[in-house]
Amino acid sequence: MTAIDEIRDNFELLDDWDDRYRYVIELGRTLEPMPEAEHSAENKVNGCVSQVWLQKLVDRGNGAPILKYRGDSDAHIVRGLVAIVLALYSGRTPQEILETDAISVFNEFGFRDHLTPQRSNGLRSMVERIKTDAKEALADAS
């Protein structure tokens, strides 16, 4: 998986939106494969036009829990958007997740003007799902 700073740097190098879309699709190909059994109703993200699944894995090692995710989609561009969401959130504590404003990052990348309203809603649904997981993990830890 690619770090969000590397994604940000690569986006700045790409001026043309066709190139940016190709890059987003390429990011989707870097996702760790998600076992078919995890394409379940429990992992399905509601509010996305395309099929999107997020599998939450909680590492309760030392200290605060760490939320890790696997993700997948049946659409190439959306799979790339999943990769960007996971670069932002996977491997973080619940507090870090709640403090991260994904929408501002997506606006910085220019997605507000270049994604369909349906894909924008799907992005928000993924972010809301992860933030809900973070709130639940915080509640469970206290």
Image (cartoon, helix red, strand yellow):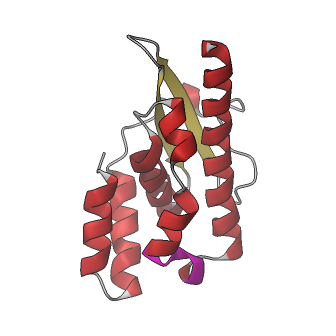
At a point 39% along the width and 84% down the height, the residue shown is 18
Rendering coords of residue 75 (x, y %): 54, 59
Q: From the viewer's perspective, is residue 2 above or below residue 18?
A: above
Quarter of the image with the N terminus is top left
Q: Nearer the viewer, residue 122 or 109?
A: 109
Principal SS element in the magenta part? helix
Which quadrant, please, contains the C terminus? top right
Judge whether 93 appears above or below 103 on screen. above
Whether residue 36 appears in this view of the structure is: no
Regarding residue 68, the answer to whether it shows in the image is yes
User: Seen from this angle, which residue lies furthest bottom?
Assistant: 16
The answer to which of 85 and 96 lies nearer the viewer is 96
Above or below for 132 versus 15: above
Q: Is residue 102 left or right of residue 9?
A: right
> Which of the two residues, 117 or 97, is positioned nearer the viewer here?
97
Q: Residue 61 appears at what percent x and percent y? A: 39, 11
Question: Residue 14: percent from the left, percent from the top?
Answer: 28, 81
Tell me which residue sits at (64%, 67%) in the image. 119
Q: Picture coordinates of residue 114 (x, y %)?
A: 54, 82
Task: Report the residue at 75% width, 47% height from top.
Answer: 46
Image position of 36 (left or right of 13): right
State which region is magenta: 109-113
